[in-house]
Structure formats: structure tokens, C-alpha cells
Amino acid sequence: MLLMGPAQSGLATAQEVPHPTTIPAMAPADSDTFVVAPYSKEWWDKVASMTSPETGLVNLDPSKAGGKMLNIGYSRSQDHVTRDVKNTGALRIFYVEAGSDADADAVAQWLREADGFEGRRVFVQGRVLLVLPSWGAQFEPPKETMASVPGYKADITSGTAAMWRNVDKDVSSLVSDPKSPRAEALSTVMTKGYGFRPGTTWIGTSKSGDDWSGSFKAGGVDAARIDFKATQKVLSESEKVLAKYEFKDTSYQFIDKGVGDVLASASFVAPSQTIHLGTDSVSAVSSVKDPAITARTDVSQFNAAASGIDSTAEKISTQTVSANANEMVISYEFAH
């Protein structure tokens, strides 16, 4: 049983109509996050907030697009292309499924000319548009897509969107070298901080874009895996002293906290632990029954600490996770 907050009722319609979509056939199979939503101004604002801030999509009025849009989506995955611009991080794509090829061309032209156009690249694949940050100068459709991923099936309607999460892929998306100390530290956060089992996947739905609730398709949270002290130790070991100066009886150190910086504005609480992890205690806005873990993170801080790449502040300010062995609720707070 899920105990849902009031925000979950935001975009419901009197009669929800199924929305078939081809967007999963364009999204990379190794996406750690994949969202598909029915098109509306409200859903545009929520899904656009998930994209790279430099695309400027969240600031646009889609009613001016000049073409019919049916569905929109978002994915984050490892970027397998060698880019001219280095250290760009995960591949984050915004999708628009148009009503026809002509509608797709019209929406693409609008996106290429609307405010902030210099921060995005637009590619057209039939009726589906793919919007990448400005450094995404080239795009090739993935050979393996979300449409073929075992266990993935997310139906959307006129009032309900769906989100896929593959927890193991978070590390490869955010950290380019899976064998690096940074990747090891982030893996510890996922397994001993959150308590996720290996191979955990989840599908949640939402009527608002604020709260997403659903069941694990594989894996889940194992309370016995959660170990805040071990997590804290690994994160502290990721710190590096960049420089040290001594002046008379005083010494100064400049420290890179590495992945440990995720805890600068985060909080993890678990009934199985005698301490909380991070800044302070936290309770979920929307919660599963008997949560094994409740965690709130600053999205910009978490992404920067995990990847080692500082960038523009995200349009989603915080993410809160409430999960037990079988279910999870993810809640977002938006910066605009």
C-alpha cells in the first residue's frame, strides 16, 4: 500500500485515454532514468525541468510550437560518443513525439529558433524529435533501445506519465570510468546508503510530476544492506588534499571532498541505523508503508559530486526517495 501526498492529483483528467508512443524505440537501453508523459503545458514544464539546464526548454511556451505534440519524454544514460567538448557528463535527451512528420518539422524549426536555441541541438527521426545540449553535435539512434529492455513496459494515458529507473546504471551515467575510485564511492552510496540490491529496476507513475510511485520490477531495497557508517567511511576516503600551506603556527588545507560532497546537502534515514547520514534528519513528503530508507538529496550537488563536473544549477532542486523491499516513491521539488 502506498500513502500518497496531495500533489499526486494534479493533472488527472475525467477520463484517461491511452497514449500509445514510439519514444521508447528511440531511448538508449542503458538509461538509468527514462520518462514518458502525455503532452500538455503542465507536463512540458515538469519533464523539461529534468533536462540539461542549458537547453532552456523549461523557459519556453510550447503552445507556440506550431505543430501538434502527442507525447514528450526524457532519458539519462552513459554518453558513448567521444565529444569535441570534454567532460560533458551523462547523455540527457528530451523527446517530442509529434502528430505527423509535418508537425515534427514545425516543432523542430520552432526549437531551433526559440529563446535559448544556442544551448540545444535538435534532431528529427520521423515523428520523434530529440533535443540534446549544445555539445551534442551528433546523434545516432541507439542500437539497443528501451523498447527492447526486459521488464520495461510503461503505459501512459492522457493523465498519467511513467518513469523507469535502473539503479545500477546511475554509476555508469554519472561516472565515465566504472573502475575509478569515484565510481566505487558512488556505488557504495547506492548499495549501502540506499540499500539497493544489484540489478534493481523500478517503474513508477505520476499524475502530477511531483510524486512518482510504483513497485520494483527486479531487486529492491534490502534493509540488511544499509550501512551508514561504512558509507560514511568510503565517502570520507574519496577526499583529496589539493594543497597545504603552513604559516607560523597555522596550517591550511584545500580539500576536494570528491563524492563525499553529496552529503553536504543530503540526508539519509533508516530504521535499521543508529545514526542518520548527511546533514540532518528527513521525512518523506509521500511515503511507502514502513520505509526501509528515506533520503533527500540536492540534485545539483549530488550530480556534481558524483560526476566531478560542476554545471548550471538543475531545475529540479531536491529529490526525496522513500522505499521498502517492494515499493518506492520518488518526490521532486522544483526550482522554478
Image: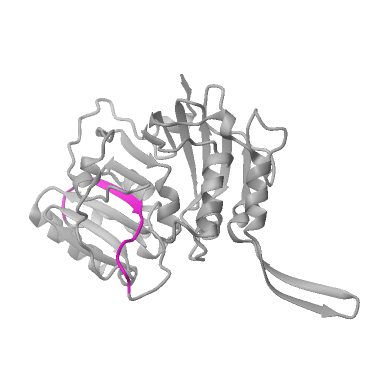
Pick whichever, 201 or 119, lies toward us.
201
Q: Residue at x 63, y 32 (%)?
A: 270
Q: Is residue 70 visible?
A: no
Task: Quadrant for residue 327, please give it.
Answer: top left
Pick whichever, 257 or 33, lies toward us.
257
Residue 84 location (% of width, % of height): 33, 76
Q: Residue at x 19, y 53 (%)?
A: 143
Tell me if residue 28 comes above or below residue 285 in the rendering. below
Residue 202 location (% of width, % of height): 38, 34
Residue situated furthest bottom in the rendering: 247
76 displayed left or right of 130: right
Pick whichever, 166 or 5, lies toward us.
166
Residue 205 location (% of width, % of height): 36, 33
172 displayed left or right of 154: right
Tell me if residue 227 comes above or below residue 30 in the rendering. above
249 displayed left or right of 279: right
Tell me if residue 292 comes above or below residue 309 in the rendering. above
Q: How many marks can you see?
A: 0
Q: Is residue 76 visible?
A: yes
| In magenta stretch: residue 81 | yes
Residue 333 location (% of width, % of height): 50, 45
Give the magenta range.
Answer: 67-83
| In magenta stretch: residue 4 | no
Residue situated furthest top in the rendering: 1
Residue situated furthest right in the rendering: 249
Tell me if residue 169 comes above or below residue 10 in the rendering. below
Q: Residue at x 41, y 54 (%)?
A: 172
Task: Quadrant for residue 259, please give it.
Answer: bottom right
